[in-house]
Amino acid sequence: MKQNHVRAKLKRGEPSVGTWLTLPSPVSAQLMARTGFDWLTIEMEHTPFSIETAAECFAIIAASGPAPLARVPLNNVQNIKRVLDTGAWGIVVPLVNSRVEAEAAVNAARYAPQGQRTIGGQLHAVNFDTDPATYYDCANEEILVVVMAEQIQAVEAADEILSVPGVDVVFIGPNDLHKSMGKKPVFDSDSKEYVEAVQHILKTAKKHGVAPGIHVLDAATAKRRIDEGFQFVAVASESGMMLAKAREVASVLGIGAGKVVAKY
């Protein structure tokens, strides 16, 4: 059975860098899987990804080297079970603001005795290059569970959330965290409240042996965050990178003045 190299790196205290896939396209996933990122997260919360398209992308990514992850639309058993049973190696769970919500995510992602994930499916084992019986025996040691801290409530409850057994990563969503503070959604800022919140999450994660993670806009910020101690770092998204490069080319050519493109 393949090892989830991302979970292994994080357990060793090493950094792991990936990006978000927001375009519901197996072709895009295939191309991005060859760029060198450790992991690629299928974004199912805010995009048109269907479970069928996500399953195709999980298979392509797993066969190409990176770990296929999925950000589920909501923290519930159905969402978590379906992406794991169709081949994701881990989950990113939004809006985890309490210990109870963290426990629910772990419970849905782990088989007994660590959780209550139910038995079924074939694609999960295939993507780990093994048989179902071996997968059921080993999955609890390979599936990555990432909880998101994207609300001020999550910051306030960080000690309770990150003390839950089975949580591997806490991942800061800067845009939503800023918005929950009554500020403009941005990837980074020098706001005192935001800086203190980020440092609190980082410190609390280290205290509980949980890998701290954060979403950044570019490679320079990724390097800075890694130097600060962040391990699980997402850089923009494939669509954000595509649009940024296209806008750069258009700007050099003196065309498209005034056009606004997404950064995420």
Image: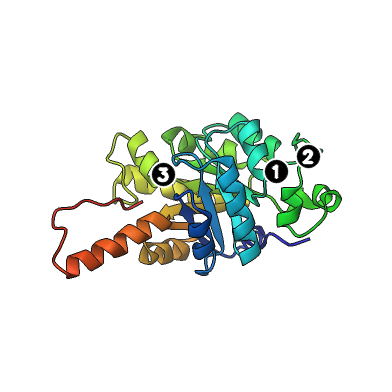
Question: In the drawing, does residue 147 fall left or right of residue 250?
Answer: right
Measured as percent of width and height from the top left, residue 200 is found at 46, 46
**Which of the two labelled residues, at mark 1 and mark 2, occupies the earlier sequence position?**
1
Q: CA distance from mark 1 to mark 3?
A: 35 Å
Q: Circles 1 and 2: CB distance less than 8 Å?
A: yes
| Other-residue count near label 1 (Cα within 10 Å), few / some / many at <14 / 14–19 / ≥20 | some
| Residue positioned 43% across, 52% down in the render | 215
Place of residue 162 in the rendered image (x, y in percent of width and height, measured from the top left): 59, 42
Q: CA distance from mark 1 to mark 2?
A: 7 Å
Nearest the viewer among 79 and 184 is 79
Instruction: Give the labeled residue for mark 3.
Output: 197
Quick one: label 3 or label 2, which is nearer the N terminus? 2
- Depth-wise, is mark 3 or mark 2 nearer the camera? 2
Image vertical order of residue 127 relative to residue 173, above or below: below
Mark identifier at residue 120: 2
Query: Does residue 165 sit above or below 189 in this rendering?
Result: above
Residue situated in front as seen by the camera: 94 or 240? 240
**Disc 2, SS:** loop
- Sequence order check, earlier mark of 1 and 3: 1
Kindly identify the residue that appears in the image at 42 percent across and 35 percent down: 152
Foreground disc of the pair 1, 3: 1
Q: Return the residue at label 1.
A: 85
Judge from the rendering whether residue 203 lies leftward or rightward of residue 168; answer left or right: left
Q: Amino acid at mark 1?
A: Asp
**Which residue appears at 32% of the width and 53% of the height?**
263
Disc 3 residue type (three-letter): Ala
Q: Position of residue 261 (x, y in %)?
A: 26, 52
